[in-house]
Amino acid sequence: MSEQAQTDADETAATSEKLVELAKRRGYFFQSSGAYGGVGGFYTFGPQGASLKGNVEDAWRDRFAVAEGNMEIDAPTIMPEPVFEASGHLDGFDDMLIECPECGASSRADHLVEDNTEYEDAESLPIPEVEEVIAEYELVCPECGAGLADVAVEAFNLMFATNIGPGDSDPGYLRPETAQGIFVEFPRLKEYARNQLPFGVTQIGRAYRNEISPRRSIIRTREFTQAELEYFVDPEEDEPDLESVADVEVTLYPASEQNSEDGSEIETTIGDAVSEGIIGDEWVAYFLGVAKPWYDSVGVDMDRFRFRQHLSGERAHYAADCWDAESEIDGNWIEMAGFAYRGDYDLSKHEEYSDDRFTIFKQYDEPKTVERATVDPDMSYLGPEFGGDAQAVVSELETLAARDRAAFEGDTIEIGLEGESHEIPVAKTGFAVEEQTEAGEHITPHVVEPSFGVDRLVYTVLHHGYREDEVSGEERTYLELEPEVAPTFVGVFPLQSDDELVAYADEIVADLRDAGLSVTYDDSGNIGRRYRRQDEVGTPFCVTVDYETVEETETTVTVRERDTTDQKRLSVDDLAETLSAIRAGEMAFEEL
């Protein structure tokens, strides 16, 4: 690392330390259960943080649910074990665990590699290769310094287990993502969508992962909030409105560049990225184009933002393509959202494991006459021959008839059952090919999933908005938060603790709150100190009621803007309307 790069990294780290301290002091976020020593990976959002987080969620809902015409649900955070058997979480939702043989400290092996070697994406490496890297670099325990070269790396399942009900209760799990709550309700949700594709279902809610080594405050925690959209499409017919996002400029880091020794990020547009094959799926491209300006609108620094394509080793087995929205924090890139084309994996799995149908009936423009291979097995033969497995044999015959009718051309047919091969006379299968007139067919929709991490986005907005400057010879810290998401939009102060000034200030507070604005009242300390307090929590505007307010013929107040500290006198009669227009983006303060 160059001297300048090291200096920049040190300054960024210092900013992060200051931000975490500010967050605790001003009520943004802090470690939970502090009275009992705290517990790793769990954070409480204070009054300012809860408000900021809620505003970010509302902004997401407005863009990805309301503006896109998608529905929203709120599913339970605990679900029964079969749900996660079907989804694959019980078998494959693992991180790499390495335990120190000396002090017993647990660490994520891939993070250990990333923090101490040139490997930037160790998560995509297989466990044996991670073990080789640890040995090659002679990595040590971050807690006690003991060597880890000969320590095995194990797969650790991240699911939180629980029991549903007393006594011989049913096992359940806290959901590791909000998506499964949408998928399992698909048979009913499709009815609300009138069985018409495409349609989308959103959900904002808590998810839980038993992280091995939570770290970096709210960036990696064990309980967090997701905002997810599952968009169901007909893969043969439905196409996104790419034209509406074609001109959106994006910074992309495709897998081909990551795998190249001199690879670098690409500056392009969504339209060009699709036409040049950089983004392979048009639906993924569409949602990248929707997300980029939205991230900008809530306060993410676009000079520290990119979309990175998953490498083949880190991409989920069901995902044909996946891109992450990443922000730069502390000199590192962190994932804020994933955009994946999940195919029909989820719905097919839940149909396989459940007793319901996870398809949609697609009606043809005109009825079609088709040939269908069917079986009508002789149960008087299959029953005595296979006993309790007879119905499983019927299912195998039905599947084979639909897939390979030529297999029934001989005298016998061979099927597999519990690892054993069995021959059945074709005459006993009732095989036939019939002409049928069909009005349509059942199809399994494919799923496009934009999945947003709310907590990481909140941290990014705070980090990217952190500022230090000097005003009138005094150092100042402030958060340059967008008015749309700032916890408090306006602070109202009486200049002095004068009864008449206080009465006017109280009236203004009531009027602004009636207009739907978030307002705080402060009469403690000198006016400069009150300004500094509101600057530090990111309040965009402050209104001061002074003696000119009560003495002049026209009732006016001083309105101060946070970033520039510029002040203007505005009429009290128009104050609520003017500030509401500024918050809605219909008017700029400098234009007043």
Image (tube, rainbow, N blue to C red):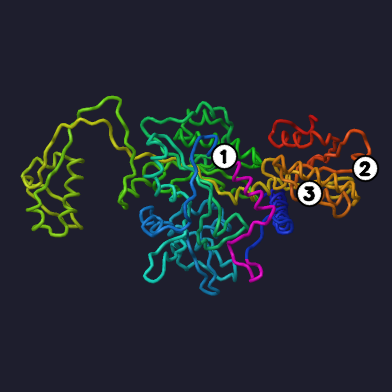
The amino acid type found where label 3 is placed reads Gln
Dot 3 falls on a residue whose secondary structure is helix
State the separation of the CA atoms marked 1 and 3.
41 Å
Give the x, y percent position of residue 329.
64, 49
State the separation of the CA atoms marked 1 and 2.
59 Å
Dot 2 falls on a residue whose secondary structure is helix
- Left or right, 567 with respect to 429, comes to right
423 magenta-colored: no
Query: Looking at the rendered structure, which numbered label has been put on residue 547?
Result: 2
Q: Quadrant of the C terminus?
A: top right
The residue tagged 1 is 264
> Which region shows up in magenta?
33-61
Q: Is residue 431 visible?
A: yes
The residue tagged 3 is 534
Q: Is 502 or 283 nearer to us in this picture?
A: 502
Task: Tell me which residue sits at (72%, 33%) in the image.
Answer: 581
